Amino acid sequence: MTYAIVEASGTQIKVQPGYFYDLNRLHVDEEGNYTFDKVLLINNDGEVTVGQPYIEGATVQGTIQRHLRGRKVIVYKMRPKKNYRKKRGHRQELTRVMINSISVNGSVIAEAESTDAEAVTPEVVETVSE
């Protein structure tokens, strides 16, 4: 199992090729490519490389799938016996990113498995009516 820990949108997140992740809003167009260059750690089938603080030449390639908003969070403030109540709502702006590959010094060490449309399409079975 190959994975990397990257720093993106002010957070550190563990990513694997072929999976998608919701991050704080990235200012990139949808369906565009995005490169994470702040890679903190790479685990390539048990071989661990740790950066200080980042690994030189390591990148993680991803594709922006869409921008969305997270679930609503209710913030309720109250002080008893003081008639003080505030109710506020908040929805976080998110970006969904599909991770395509992890590479070190230009060579790809892990890549998402591609699914061909022809391989996924079921065969058409002809029926003969009598």
Image (tube, grey):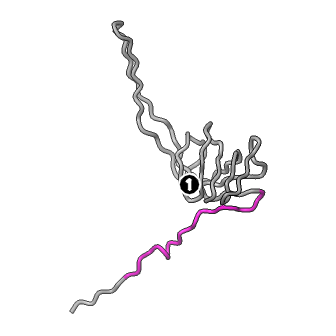
Instruction: Describe residue 5's horizontal placement relative to residue 80 as left or right.
Output: right
Q: Is residue 121 magenta?
A: yes
Instruction: Describe residue 78's horizontal placement relative to residue 57 as left or right.
Output: left
Instruction: Describe residue 116's horizontal placement relative to residue 12 as left or right.
Output: left
Instruction: Describe residue 53's horizontal placement relative to residue 18 as left or right.
Output: right
| Residue 118 vs residue 110, the one in the foreground | 110
Q: Position of residue 38 (x, y in %)?
A: 70, 45
Q: State whether residue 88 is above or below residue 114.
A: above
Residue at the spot of label 1: 98
Q: Quadrant of residue 3?
A: bottom right
**Residue bounds of the magenta highlight:** 105-124
What residue is at 38 percent from the left and 15 percent from the top?
78
The amino acid marked with disc number 1 is Met
| Residue 27 vs residue 22, the one in the foreground | 22
| Residue with the most extreme bottom position | 130
| Residue 44 vs residue 121, the one in the foreground | 44
| Residue with the most extreme front position | 46
Q: State whether residue 116 is above or below residue 92.
A: below
What residue is at 54 percent from the left and 56 percent from the top?
19
Q: State whether residue 22 is above or below residue 105.
A: above
| Residue 32 vs residue 127, the one in the foreground | 127
* Quadrant into which the C terminus falls: bottom left
Q: How many marks?
A: 1
- Circle 1 sits in a helix, a strand or a loop, which is it? strand
* Quadrant into which the N terminus falls: bottom right
Q: Position of residue 23 (x, y in %)?
A: 55, 43
Q: Position of residue 63 (x, y in %)?
A: 59, 54
Q: Are there few (<14), some (14-19), or many (20+) residues within 10 Å of tag 1?
A: many
